[in-house]
Amino acid sequence: MKIKLLLAGLASALAITSAPVSAELLVPHLTYRTGPFAGNGIVFANGFYDYMTMLNERDGGIGGVKVNVEECETGYNAQKGVECYESTKGRNPLITIPNSTGITLQLIQKASVDQIPLLSAGYGLSAAAVGEKFPWIFNAPTTYWGQMSAILSYIGELEGGMDNLSGKKIGFIYLDAGYGREPLPLLETLSEQYGFEVLKIPVAGKEMQNQSSHWLTVRKEKPDWMIMWGWGAMNSTAIKAAAKIRFPMDRFIGNWWSSAHVDMKGHEELAKGYRGATFSANGDSFPALQDVIKLVVDPGKSQTTDKSTVGNVLYNRGVINAVLTAEAITIAQKNTGKTDITGADMRDAFEQIDMSEARLSELGLEGFMEPIKISCTEHSGSNPVIMTQWNGEDWVPSKAVPVLREIVIPELEAAADKYISDKPGWTTQTCS
Amino acid sequence: MFYREAGQFKTDYKSDSAVFPILQDRVGIAFMIFLALVVVPLYGWSSSSGEFFLNGIMIPFMIFALVTIGLNILMGYAGQLSLGTGAFTGVGAYACYKLITHFPELNLIVAVLMSGFFAAAVGIIFGLPSLRIKGLYLAVTTLAAQFFLEWLFIRWEWLYNYDPSGALIVPDITAFGIIIAGPSANAVVKYLVVTLIVIFMTWIASNVIRGRIGRSWMMIRDMDIAAELMGVRPLAAKLSAFAMSSFYCGVGGAMMVFFWLGAAEVESFDINHSFLFLFMVIIGGMGSLIGSFMGAAFIWVLPIIIKFLPATIGIEIYPSTVEHINLMIIGGLIVFFLAVEPNGLARLWQLAKEKLRVWPFPYA
């Protein structure tokens, strides 16, 4: 008991000294550079950190105020996520970037209470795309549901029309957790609509690296296409297992957490032809990324030790998160006329984000992503998904596929209504 | 193994059979309770970082301590090795969620305590093999419970009301006219509810352990054949240990979701948590209630302090590096403490107390 006392005393002493010091833009970033998914997490976190550092070095921050990216290590563990969130909550953080669907689910309800907007770019709760029901949550550029519909419409296109999907068998291999199960409701709706059969293959977290039985099922059932919602070691295991049963790689499509450079490492040749979805362009040939290399990576101001990872799929996705955050800060500063803004200002700013091609080229990121527009009603925007293919050495973008909005948006609205139906006192907003 | 401390002269039977026969212990416990119920909430209420202190450190610490007491009843007192703790906390959490969503007018505190009974029932079922098998073999069967229940929590969609995300999500819940759980709940209120439940249940545990049931557990633990010959029924003793242990785990799990996390997936009840609680018991001290608190503090609170220490004293270091150092320090300390005192922190604490009472004389 004495030890507890000492610890409590020490903790309180620590907490007192950690008061805010000077005006800066506090951007907490929940990272996972450790733990089972560190291989993916490091690259992503570096992209975010390096882009923000580049803004500090090149422009002296945003609106003349330095951005303070405060990383907090979660190890992709949901419980540590809460701890990280609480540790910055009292110091006027501008945003929450949970980087895990599990952590997102825990923080969704807190966002409106604590007045801190939450950006879960391309993950988290799909229903949160409905801005009127989830005023504080943003999941641009597209939800998991939107992504699933885009992948299916891409398959339809390759089959020569959506009508040809009828009678086809589409396998869906997914991580058996909140993340992997997210798109299931939409997949079922679409299968009814287009008349294809879905073969569900859940992979439990502890079986991630042992999928032989799952792929035995695939071999037996002979699906026409395979779609994967995997993460971490599950991706490369699946690709190797698919190659082993000689599943045609160009009929195997991974979502945007299953199609990064790290997932191909060690079996580049086997994976040739494998397709993936993404929302960022590949490579470091963009002026802004060149600035990152020149001002941050080369002088050793970042944690990026391997320069070749700059421009990788996950790195660029970290950059997109940073770009959206920085853009919201810029808009909020313009709206309020102040440099020190609050989380509430950020929320309003997020609803005005308009990443047009002109704006992107102004930022030195022309063609870096599909133009994104966020509005009061659409917090994801259901933007097009870029389909890419692995050529044995690198990812080659093939085309941007639009989301099946007329199907996805009513589904999202129904899900949002269901989510808030049993939560009395839920904060909503009305969009004019 | 821990036995009653002695050394202070008693003049009547009443004082000899008191819960805390040593004067310093009585003062110490009163002081701890005062600290937990007055000083900590006051600090949490007044300080700017008080919310982090309560939500991030104290609430999980209290909840983990309760679950550790639960596992300690089974492992430390009844001598039955279990690796299913994580799943048993999950049973409590899902039961509480179902109770609250089906009977919204039910008081949350009642629901939390009721969910313990569901966990106890499941615990009894998975405790049945303990009548035939012992030690590591039993650990394997409880491991099966862990895997089975984890699977069930995902597959049985009714448990989470068919929510597409598969997570338990806690809305604002009002009891006695104030919001006691959910996103808008005040951290001080949540902390006080949790602490009162933990103190109450610790008090119950200490009395059960001192009584007939607790003694029968310890007899089974120390030598089951001798216990049987003396009239202890292994069926009743072992299953009651499983029931009570799971009850505590279940209540802890329900509190974990409702008063701490606010939303939880199966991940919060996985095998890693079973190991975490096992470590808390071993580090704290098998068969010691105070050790359960120490173990929870060591495994949960210490890493948080190490994590935020460099930033608060102004050392520029990457958080991921701190995390790596953290793992090394905690791992090293576990080895160190267990090498110095295999019976855990509680034993160290007991020795220190005994030595201090007779100080400066080396022997009592």
Image: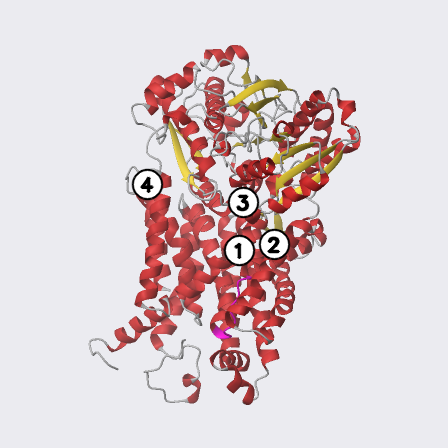
Q: Main secondary structure of the magenta part?
A: loop
- Residue type for callout 4: Ala
**First in sequence: mark 1 vs mark 4:** 1
Residue A227 versus residue B239 in the image, above or below: above
Does residue B59 lie above or below B346 as drawn? above
Question: Which type of secondary structure does the marked residue at label 4 adopt?
Answer: helix
Evaluate if marks 2 and 1 touch, with contact meaning CB atoms under 8 Å apart: yes
What chain does mark 2 sit on?
B
Residue A415 sits inside the magenta stretch: no
Q: Residue, x 54% and y 20% (percent of image)?
A: A396
The residue identified by callout 3 is A209
Residue in the image at 47% along x and 44% along y:
A36
Q: Are marks 1 and 3 in contact (CB under 8 Å)?
A: no
Q: How is the image coloured?
A: secondary structure
- Residue B166 is at least partly visible in this image: no
Number of marks in the rendered image: 4
Residue type, numbered disc 1? Ile
